Amino acid sequence: LAMGIPRVILFCLFGTTLCLTGSQALQCYSFEHTYFGPFDLRAMKLPIVSCPHECFEAILSLDTGYRAPVTLVQKGCWTGPPTGRMQSNQDALPPDYSVVRGCTTDMCNAHLMTHDALPNLSQAPDPPTLSGTECYACIGIHQNDCAIGRSRRVQCHQDQTSCFQGNGRMTVGNFSVPVYIRTCHRPSCTTMGTTSPWTTIDLQGSCCEGHLCNTESVIQPFNSASATTPPRALQVLALLLPILLLVRLSA
């Protein structure tokens, strides 16, 4: 009996140690913000939260294609499925980009910290030829951000001979903002934002032909992007292979 007591105590202590180790939370940076230009988080002291499984960071950016972006940045605890596929249409406009990253060590979600994590979504064609069409261009998260009086007049690139106006929503995890936009577009008017199990850029709108014709309200009811996509573009979309964009790294 005397020898049994220490054995019971040792078992309980060992069991407690296992329990504490198994339930030890991961320390992750927590942050979310909307930017309308370049950003740099490297000098910021970001809050830290406890996460049960993994850390997470993501960036979504939507651009007019004429140096006017809306960018969502989020860091925190991993939620949703462990893996998934990013779906996009390379023929769609306006240009957008999404990147999602998960990791499994303390404060490892500190890789996507600056605007350099994004490609150039306003890249001019080479050679820099113009289509001859002029459109209003604007983007914002409030309706007034795209009032005609606050919109720029831009000369459209190459094959962009139509003007576009629309609205939608950008979502990453539980962080979501509305978006309103005017810009140049191709005659096909293919409008499909990048989507994944963790992120969505959902857009709807309409195109028009003519000089500065995109002056209608950006909050009018539009057909869905799939309804305005012509059959040929739908066939291209069906053939596109989804892009695996989740990078699961250990820092």
Image (spheres, grey):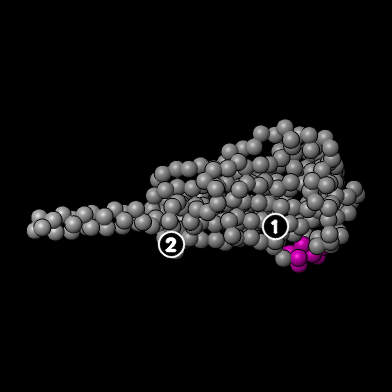
Q: Label 2 sits on what residue type?
A: Val
Which residues, given as a range, are shown in magenta? 143-150
Q: Dividing the picture into quarters, in which one does residue 136 lie?
A: bottom right
Q: Residue furthest top?
A: 239
Left or right, residue 73 beside residue 208: left
**Residue 138 in sight from this viewpoint:** no
Which of 44 and 246 lies nearest the eye of the viewer? Answer: 246
Residue 169 marker: 1
Quarter location, residue 9: bottom left
**Dot 2 lies on which element?**
strand
Q: Earlier in the sequence, mark 1 or mark 2?
A: 2
Three-letter code, disc 1: Arg
- On the rendered structure, is 140 left or right of 230? left
Residue 232 sits in quarter: top right
The residue tagged with tag 1: helix, strand or loop?
strand
- Residue 47 falls left or right of residue 15: right
Quadrant of the frame with the C terminus: top left
Residue 193: x %, y % from top left:
70, 48
**Numbered circles on residues, count:** 2
- Mark 2 neighbour class, 10 Å CA radius: few under 14, some 14 to 19, many 20 or more: some
Question: Dot 1 surroundings within 10 Å: few (below 14), some, or many (20 or more)?
Answer: some
Instruction: Say which mark, if any, is on residue 49.
Output: 2
Which residue corresponds to the image point at 66% horizontal and 47% vertical from the top-left?
Answer: 195
Please tell me whether residue 197 belongs to the stretch shown in magenta: no
The residue drawn where x is 62% and y is 46% is 196
